[in-house]
């Protein structure tokens, strides 16, 4: 076997592995159908990209956010959506477009044709490299288009009050202008009433999610979080399915950290809770994922409130 044949064999092997891995990457685990979809989503003010301390309830680390409007090293006023990465569930059109191009390229290389098999049969290692480069170029082009298309609106970009017509910044934007991003962090005392509010929100948010009550969710979570919930609910409707989370009961919880930024309080809490998580067919009610059997989940939730206002869910992070 000469070098060219060996190189082609190696690339084909890689193509097989990636082609088989793509469906697994794009699949949604039925065990993660609950509110938040098993993702780490939302914002924690100036601590969004700092891992919360481990606790007795969650001794491991909390996952980094894969759905957030925040950007590292930038104030929330310049925040832009980072919606689950290229192949994340939030990828929408881009996820399908990129996966389609990539899958086509990989399978093309697998069967020897590549993306442009008709152009003289690019069978040399140079041809294979060119094909891979073309796939990467198309994916990056699609990513650039997606970012431009989803540039944040004024309500999410912290528009100045004097910037003219359009939505203006308010503290419920889920972004920093109202949540005091960049302000000096001040330790915050969390009282028994606050813990009761966190436990109540845990149950009410799961209930509103199960009922697909977006209006209720808007009273319990920041608009950023509700935007993720709406997207996940829309995907369920597209599959003609509805996720039902019932029998939610907090089993254990403890505070990871609490602080104040400007006029906004934050509290990050690790919670282990029981639940029954099932997804049913919207028409027949037949279970299509999950079961009637209760299970347990440990997640790290961050709540935010402005002085004189109730707590709202600002972020959910999975635990490692």
Image: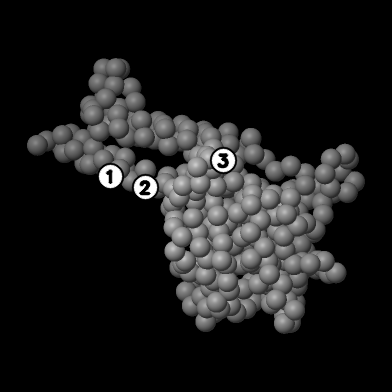
Q: Nearer the viewer, residue 102 or 267?
A: 267
Q: CA distance from mark 2 to mark 3?
A: 22 Å
Residue 209 on image: x %, y %:
62, 54
Is residue 217 found left or right of 276 in the rendered image?
Answer: right
Q: Is residue 282 among the parts visible in the rendering?
A: yes
The relative height of residue 79 versus residue 220 in the rendered view (above or below) is above
The C terminus sits in image quarter: bottom left
Label 3, on which residue?
237
User: Which residue sits at x=75%, y=70%?
Assistant: 265
Kindly report the distance in space between the C-alpha atoms of the residues bearing marks 1 and 3. Answer: 32 Å
Residue that badge 1 annotates: 17
Residue beneath disc 2:
24
From the viewer's perspective, tell me whether residue 139 is left or right of residue 250.
left
- Would you say residue 45 is visible in this rendering? no
Q: Earlier in the sequence, mark 1 or mark 2?
A: 1
Mark 1–mark 3 CB contact (< 8 Å): no
Q: What element does badge 2 sit on?
A: helix
Local crowd size for mark 3, using a 10 Å CA cut-off: few (<14), some (14–19), many (≥20): some
- Which residue is drawn at the image coordinates 57% and 67% (left, top)? 248
């Amino acid at each position: 076997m000469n070098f060219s044949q060996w190189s082609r064999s190696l690339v084909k092997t890689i193509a097989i592995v990636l082609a088989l891995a793509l469906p697994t990457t794009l699949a949604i685990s039925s065990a993660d159908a609950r509110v938040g979809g098993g993702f780490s989503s939302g914002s924690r003010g100036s601590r969004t990209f700092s891992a919360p301390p481990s606790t007795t309830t969650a001794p491991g680390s909390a996952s980094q956010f894969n759905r957030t409007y925040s950007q590292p090293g930038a104030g929330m006023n310049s925040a832009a959506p980072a919606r689950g990465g290229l192949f994340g569930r939030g990828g929408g059109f881009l996820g399908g477009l990129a996966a389609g191009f990539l899958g086509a390229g990989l399978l093309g290389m697998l069967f020897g044709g590549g993306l442009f098999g008709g152009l003289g049969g690019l069978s040399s290692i140079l041809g294979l490299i060119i094909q891979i480069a073309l796939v990467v170029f198309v994916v990056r082009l699609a990513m650039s288009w997606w970012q431009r298309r989803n540039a944040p609106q004024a309500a999410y970009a912290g528009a100045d009050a004097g910037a003219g017509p359009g939505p203006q910044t308010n503290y419920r934007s889920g972004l920093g202008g109202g949540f005091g991003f960049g302000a000096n962090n001040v330790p915050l005392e969390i009282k028994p009433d606050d813990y009761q509010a966190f436990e109540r929100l845990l149950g009410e948010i799961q209930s509103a999610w199960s009922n697909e009550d977006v209006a209720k969710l808007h009273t319990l979570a920041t608009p950023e979080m509700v935007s993720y919930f709406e997207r996940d609910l829309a995907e369920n409707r597209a599959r003609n399915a509805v996720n039902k989370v019932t029998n939610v009961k907090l089993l254990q919880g403890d505070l990871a950290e609490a602080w104040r930024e400007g006029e906004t309080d934050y509290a990050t809490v690790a919670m282990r809770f029981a639940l029954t998580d099932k997804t049913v067919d919207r028409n027949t009610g037949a279970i299509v994922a999950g079961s009637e059997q209760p299970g347990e989940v440990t997640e790290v939730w961050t709540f935010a409130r402005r002085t004189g206002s109730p707590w709202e869910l600002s972020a959910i992070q999975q635990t490692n």
